[in-house]
Amino acid sequence: MELCEKTLDSKNIFEGKILNITLDDVELPDGSHSKREVVNHPGGVAVLALDGENNIYFVRQFRYPYKEVVFELPAGKLEKGSTPLENGKRELLEEIGAEGYSYISLGQVYPSPGYTSEIIYLYACRIKDFKQQQLDDGEFLNVEKLPFSKAVEMVLNNQIPDSKTQIAILKAAALLNSGKI
Amino acid sequence: MELCEKTLDSKNIFEGKILNITLDDVELPDGSHSKREVVNHPGGVAVLALDGENNIYFVRQFRYPYKEVVFELPAGKLEKGSTPLENGKRELLEEIGAEGYSYISLGQVYPSPGYTSEIIYLYACRIKDFKQQQLDDGEFLNVEKLPFSKAVEMVLNNQIPDSKTQIAILKAAALLNSGKI
């Protein structure tokens, strides 16, 4: 059977600053009908930036949905009119105050494909220079660096729950081991 | 500065079958006010199940937010009244028709901590026995198995975007290498 769902109707539930929620009627592969609750998201980017001593730079931020401080790579939403890589460079400068070079892609992440359209683009880079952190209004975070090997150990010990951060660290570790970073 | 956001007000925007959307007013660490768009989600579980020849079992499903077929580990939402592990065992039986043993935790995933409260619990297991697949009404998917080494290669070549699937494969690979699975 062909795996496809056809949109019959789409109702706009909420247009927020970040999220746009729709409730769609769909036709399933067997011709029956169902509903789909969809979070339409502009997409995101995250950057794993390494200094000359192979430290990775992280941010600690209060993440309201969990009501806790979460440990993550510097990251942000995609802004219209610029590429994922340009967005990544901007977020690294804003949140860490760092300029990178030798950027490589670590692929893309579909965080939760059952309900959100978000795609997170991942990059790794080397840090060239440190400047002034440039946080947005209303953005509060602490920067922390960790040796690469310690970050890998924390992911494997289940101490870093954030999806993009786990994936970027484990992929970069495999690439470092094979000499590709 | 203490990284904390205090809820001032919470408005229910949408109560769906899966998602519950709220728009909250919060007080930021510096005393200023802001809004938070939150997707409240019951949580999920995914299982990396290995047969005697180290094949992993996957599902291909049409994922409506991306309008494409996505390659994932068997997974599902958490149902009330049962543990994440019990939910994982149920999903493995329903989607793959397999019964597992030697379950171990591969940790938890926060798929996108900026806006969703979802926690995905990850497990790995060995497959004991194959039975009849028991799909829910309206659930359409194809099962596919891949050698473990091929799955790792696909993640590293950016051919598997799903977050839980990337993380479970890369963590299980590290544990297999160190003899822990």
Image (tube, coloured by chain):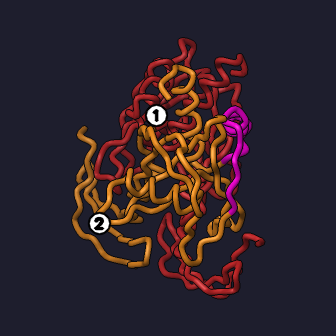
Chain colours: A red, B orange
Which sits in the foreground, A44 or B21? B21
The circle drawn on residue A133 is 1
Residue B52 position in % (x across, y down): 62, 36
Is A47 situated left or right of B38 in this image? right
Magenta part of the chain: B142-160
Residue for point 43% across, 41% down:
B103
Q: Between B122 and B32, which is closer to the camera in this rendering?
A: B122
**Residue beneath the point at 55% across and 81% down:** A35
Q: Is residue A117 above or below residue A130?
A: below
* Image quadrant containing the C terminus of chain A: top right
The amino acid type, in three-letter code, at marker 2 is Asp
Could one spot residue A11 in this view of the protein? yes
Say if residue A41 shows up in the picture.
Answer: no
Secondary structure found at label 2: strand
Q: Label 2 belongs to which residue? A: B25
Queried whether the magenta region covers residue B151, the answer comes back as yes
* Depicted B110 relative to depicted A31: above or below: above
